[in-house]
Image: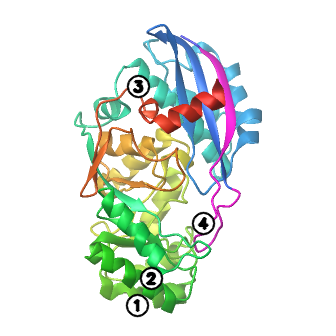
């Protein structure tokens, strides 16, 4: 049982959209294909991995540092103890050999891309969806094919007025979503309040709306926004300040009675633990958004979930950033609170298999093998185009 080839390609996910901090005009994405000598129905099993939006391709890290480590590793260091499948944990150790603690920057994305592809392979060899494999091996054995999802959008865009924002949100409701998210912080408070009020006219209850500042605010501005939006009783106020400013988040939690959300830009178990220790996050109303593909992959994510358990946090308070299928699988197999989805953005990387049905912000998907990429036509075609 061997890995016979690893390829990395760059795919564009560029768009003219903006959040409060960055433009996506030049964004791209690293995509990895790992080919094994294991065959099913005469075809070699291939695992695919990629990372979330909001980051750039990590080609040099992959091609000069991490992929060579796998290629140079001995077979015993890649396989499980039984020798009948690959071991994500052993492969993770190979990837992280000679890496110093800390420094959780772009390398966490590169490792996460490879890790995703490995889990795709493992579950394909098991001939099961990843969520089922995770539940049986790392969870309580219980899994579901139905999870909560919300539609993320509401970006700033040239010429996008209130009417276009409302039309976007109506489109998400037509697709079966009842909970949506929009950006704030890229305009004045007065203008953002008008935008929020316009979306509330579409989605109704404030608990159907999340707002995201993408780390834009200092403490005074975060508090100003918090006081202004608190009467709306929103589902959550996301990433008000810099993701590593735990003190800001702690102070905000003291004066804002509704839910806060953060964590998408924390890239290790240790960073997640610091947020829980020092960020003022409340176990009963706040949300954690750690993104597996950006934070060293699922091997590290399992450590993060264990850390949460040790700190008496429920896994249901985690709704990952990113909108990709590995998070759907983790949510379905390890009892997370749901997943973010970008119905009209960053495609074809986001979402779930084409046969999936969204009703009342819950998605149900039919059984698939592996991560489910091959059941998403546009993504499958892109992968064929990139690696054929």
Extent of the magenta region: 3-26
Q: Residues within 10 Å of mark 4 (few under 14, many from 20)?
A: some
Q: Residues within 10 Å of mark 3 (few under 14, many from 20)?
A: many
Q: Can residue 279 be spotted in the picture?
A: no
Question: Can you tell which quarter of the image residue 301 is in?
Answer: top left
Is 23 inside the magenta-drawn segment? yes
**Secondary structure at numbered mark 2:** helix
209 or 5: nearer the viewer: 209
Residue at the (43%, 67%) spot, across then down: 168
364 or 137: nearer the viewer: 364
Name the N-terminal-most of marks 2 and 1.
Answer: 2
Residue 55 lies, in percent from the top left, at: 63, 54
Give how far apart the Cα atoms at labels 3 and 1 are: 47 Å
Residue placed under numbered mark 3 in the picture: 123
| Vertical placement of residue 72 versus 214, above or below | above
**CB within 8 Å, label 2 to label 3:** no
Q: Residues within 10 Å of mark 2 (few under 14, many from 20)?
A: many
Residue placed under numbered mark 2 in the picture: 195
Residue 54 lies, in percent from the top left, at: 60, 57
Residue placed under numbered mark 1 in the picture: 228
Name the N-terminal-most of marks 4 and 3.
Answer: 4
**CB within 8 Å, label 3 to label 1:** no
218 or 167: nearer the viewer: 167
Give how far apart the Cα atoms at labels 1 and 4 are: 25 Å
Give how far apart the Cα atoms at labels 2 and 4 are: 16 Å
């Amino acid at each position: 049982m061997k890995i016979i080839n690893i390829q990395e390609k760059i795919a564009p996910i560029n768009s003219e959209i903006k959040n409060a901090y960055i433009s996506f005009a030049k964004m791209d994405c690293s995509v990895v294909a790992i080919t094994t000598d294991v065959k099913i129905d005469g075809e070699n099993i291939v695992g695919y991995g990629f990372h979330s939006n909001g980051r750039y391709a990590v080609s040099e890290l992959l091609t000069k540092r991490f992929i060579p480590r796998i290629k140079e590793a001995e077979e015993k260091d890649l396989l499980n103890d039984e020798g009948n499948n690959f071991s994500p944990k052993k492969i993770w150790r190979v990837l992280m050999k000679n890496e110093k603690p800390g420094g959780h920057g772009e390398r966490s994305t590169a490792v996460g891309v490879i890790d995703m592809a490995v889990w795709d392979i493992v579950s394909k060899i098991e001939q099961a969806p990843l969520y089922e494999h995770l539940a049986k091996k790392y969870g309580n054995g219980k899994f579901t094919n139905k999870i909560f999802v919300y539609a993320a959008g509401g970006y700033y865009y040239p010429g996008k007025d209130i009417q276009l924002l409302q039309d976007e949100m109506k489109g998400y409701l037509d697709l079966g979503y009842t909970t949506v998210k929009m950006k704030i912080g890229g305009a004045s408070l007065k203008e953002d309040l008008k935008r929020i009020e316009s979306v509330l006219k579409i989605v109704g209850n404030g608990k159907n709306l999340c707002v995201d500042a993408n780390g834009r605010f200092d403490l005074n501005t975060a508090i100003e926004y918090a006081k202004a939006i608190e009467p709306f009783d929103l589902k959550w106020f996301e990433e008000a300040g810099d993701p590593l400013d735990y003190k800001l988040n702690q102070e905000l939690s003291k004066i804002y009675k509704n839910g806060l959300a953060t964590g998408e830009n924390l890239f290790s178990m240790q960073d997640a633990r610091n947020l829980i220790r020092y960020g003022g996050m409340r176990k009963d109303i706040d949300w954690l958004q750690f993104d597996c593909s950006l934070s060293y992959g699922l091997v590290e994510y399992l450590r993060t979930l264990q850390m949460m358990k040790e700190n008496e946090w429920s896994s249901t308070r985690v709704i990952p950033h990113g909108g990709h299928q590995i998070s759907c699988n983790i949510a379905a197999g390890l009892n997370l609170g749901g997943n973010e989805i970008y119905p009209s953005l960053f495609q074809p990387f986001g979402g779930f298999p084409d046969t999936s049905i969204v009703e009342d912000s819950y998605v149900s998907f039919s059984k698939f093998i592996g991560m489910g990429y091959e059941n998403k036509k546009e993504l499958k075609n892109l992968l064929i185009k990139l690696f054929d």
